[in-house]
Amino acid sequence: SAQAPLTARCPPGAAQTAAMPKAAKTTGKKVAPVPYEDPKKAVAKKEPTGPIWEKKPKNFSIGGDIQPKRDLSRYVHWPKYVRIQRQRKILYQRLKVPPSINQFSNTLDKNLSLNLFKLLHKYRPEDAAQKKERLKDLAEKKEAGDEAASKKPLYVKYGINHITKLCEQKKAQLVCIAHDVDPIELVLWLPAVCRKMDIPYCIVKSKSRLGALVHKKTATALALVSVRPEDRHEFSQLVTAIRQQYNENAKTIERTWGGGIMGVKSQAKTEVLNRAIAKEAAKKAMM
């Protein structure tokens, strides 16, 4: 007898499964398992309690955050007067400066200049409004018949021609000269005049500070003709210290040259050369 077909022997669902194609095997690599997280470290992590503590790193790439401010003074095209004053400062260091000009770099020390300016501040000249008020009061008194001999108030004298006359007449008791007068020839001769007339003089910083005392932008020099009785002790102490530094130190000032200080690169080159010469000399001594 003929054999029965295969489908008749198999159960009803089996034929369908046998007919379906098998799924293709994946050849990709297996993904590494997630590393074991230490529970202690997990506890140590603290979640931020608000947006204030959130870390927000800045991104300085193109189109990102605004770049921080940098010092670009090296690349600035400075005005001509700034370049000139900087070059002059360097030249004064490099070139040999004669004693007559170099004396202006020997300024009064900080403590003395502080005491000096305190004293000078007491003798500031009146400004236009104060002078107008004083003359008005004087005119009113004169009109009322009170012609009392009014003395001119004691003030600091300024103006280079005025100070020169006061020095020549030996009326000045102290002369203060600015260290940064430009051109320097305006006051170059004044220390010599003061020394000859035996008037105490000093060189202070700076012309703008002296100018502020007399209601001007700058002042080359100031002079005190006399002081009030209550300031005499302080004034005499100042004069003694100033005389010691300038008038009595005249020979040293007249002989001391300035400048001759080379740049860092030049100094390094000279040092290398000196070392090489010393090494050569040591070799010759050993032979």
Image (cartoon, grey):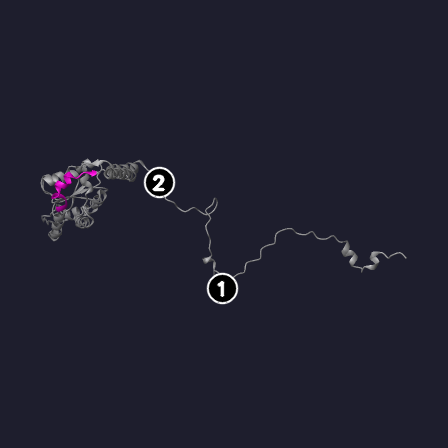
Q: Is residue 6 magenta?
A: no
> Where 114 sits versus 164, above or below?
below
List x then y, in percent, for residue 211. Answer: 21, 43
Type of residue at label 2?
Arg
Outermost residue toward the front? 287
Drawn side of residue 55 relative to residue 227, left or right: right
Residue with the mark numbered 1: 40
Q: Does residue 191 appear to the left or right of 8 in the view shown?
A: left
User: Which of the 4 quarters of the picture holds residue 287?
Assistant: top left
Residue 145 rendering spot, x and y as whole percentages: 10, 49
Q: Which corner quadrant of the image does residue 84 belong to? A: top left
Q: Determine which residue is flagged by label 2.
A: 74
In the image, residue 114 sits, relative to residue 219, either above or below, namely: below
Please state if 108 lies on the left or on the right of 55 as rendered: left
- The circle drawn on residue 116 is none
Identify which residue, 99 or 6, lies in the foreground.
Answer: 6
Q: Point out the frontmost of discs 2 and 1.
A: 1
Question: In 3D space, how far apart are the residues under numbered discs 2 and 1 (Cα atoms)?
Answer: 54 Å
Badge 1 local density, few (<14 within 10 Å), some, or many (20+)? few
Mark 2, secondary structure of its residue: helix
Number of residues whose C-alpha sits closer than 10 Å to that of mark 2, classed few (under 14), some (14–19) or many (20 or more): few
Asked whether residue 105 is in view, the answer is: yes
> Disc 2 or 1, which lies upstream in sequence?
1
Q: Nearer the viewer, residue 269 or 229?
A: 269
Please give the range of residues in magenta: 244-258
